[in-house]
Every structure is written in C-alpha cells, then in structure tokens.
Image: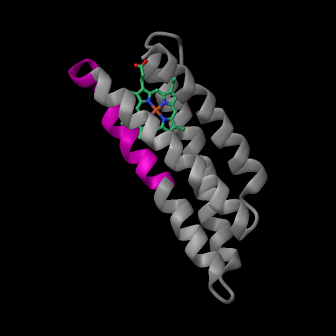
Amino acid sequence: MEALIEIHLVVAFLLALCALVFSWNTMGRRVVNAVAVLQFVVGLAIAGMLGKAAPSQVWVHLIVALLILGAYGMAMAAGKREGGSSRALIFSIVGFILVFANIWLGWAMAHPGAGV
Ligand code: HEM
C-alpha cells in the first residue's frame, strides 16, 4: 500500500514532466495519455484499497483525473485532423494545467494540515 502511494507520487511528477516535454505533437500526446492512464489505474487501486478510509475529496480528484484523460484524448483526436493542430495545442495546455491542479489536490488530500 505504502509502495503504491509512493508510485502514485512519482508517476504524478513523471506525468507533469511528460506533459511539459511531449505535449507538442501527436506522438508526444500519445505518450502523455499513456502515462495519465497509468496514473489513473494506480490511483484507482489506492482508492479501492483505502475503501471507506479514502479522503472525502477523492471524488474531486477522480473527476479532475477524468478531465485530464478527456483533454488529452481530445488533443490526440484534434491533432490527427486536418487543420486541428491549434485546437490540439489548446487541449494539451488545458490538460497540462489540470495535471498540476490534480497534483496540488492529491498532495493536499494526502497531507492534510501541511499548509497547502
Ligand atoms: C492523472 C491524475 C492524477 C494525479 C496527477 C494524481 C496525483 C496525486 C498526488 C500527487 C497525490 C499525493 C501523493 C502523496 O503525497 O504521497 C495523490 C494522492 C491520492 N490520489 Fe491521486 N492522482 C491522480 C489520479 C488519481 C485517481 C484517478 C485516483 C482514484 C480515485 C486517485 C486517488 C488518490 C488517493 C486516494 C490519494 C491519497 C492517498 C493518501 O491518502 O495517502 N488519484 N494523487
């Protein structure tokens, strides 16, 4: 369990790094989306193991995670379309901002009272 939370924290920053470095083309967005799916699955496993002991804000955290997957999904779809590259970039930037918002939410949830 401890190890899973540790993995979730490491993959969160890996996702932020990938979102920054790889968001600029279609292949890169695939990489970001794959890391986001991995993070989603690890998060679900943690929430499942915590069960009722999971923090109450976990629902907001889950919805933001779904929005991240949606944003990168739309970015990938837009990038494949003729003339869709600027829309793809906008969706990628939205995804990037949401990744940071969710890191902040997850951190505040895991460390209540830590001043975040
Ligand atoms: C891409 C999306 C996600 C990001 C960037 C993210 C990021 C984080 C971060 C940074 C933490 C703090 C970890 C720590 O300080 O050790 C955290 C905690 C947590 N995350 Fe996520 N997370 C994501 C998706 C999810 C999903 C889909 C779930 C499932 C509902 C989830 C469930 C949790 C839970 C339950 C905790 C708190 C663990 C505890 O109380 O110690 N996360 N998340």
Q: Tell me where residue 40 sits by quadrant.
A: top left
Q: Depth check: give the residue in front, 52 or 38.
A: 38
Please give the range of residues in magenta.
51-68
Q: Residue at x 55, y 48 (%)?
A: 36
**Relative to 53, is 24 above or below?**
below
Q: Depth check: give the residue in front, 5 or 55.
A: 5
Image coordinates of residue 77 in percent, x first then y, are 56, 75
Q: Depth check: give the residue in front, 56 or 6.
A: 6
Q: Residue at x 64, y 42 (%)?
A: 15
Image coordinates of residue 115 in percent, x first then y, are 53, 13
Residue 11 at least partly seen = yes
The secondary structure that dominates the magenta segment is helix
For the C terminus, which image quadrant?
A: top right
Q: Residue at x 63, y 50 (%)?
A: 96
Q: Residue at x 63, y 61 (%)?
A: 30
Is-magenta flag for residue 57? yes
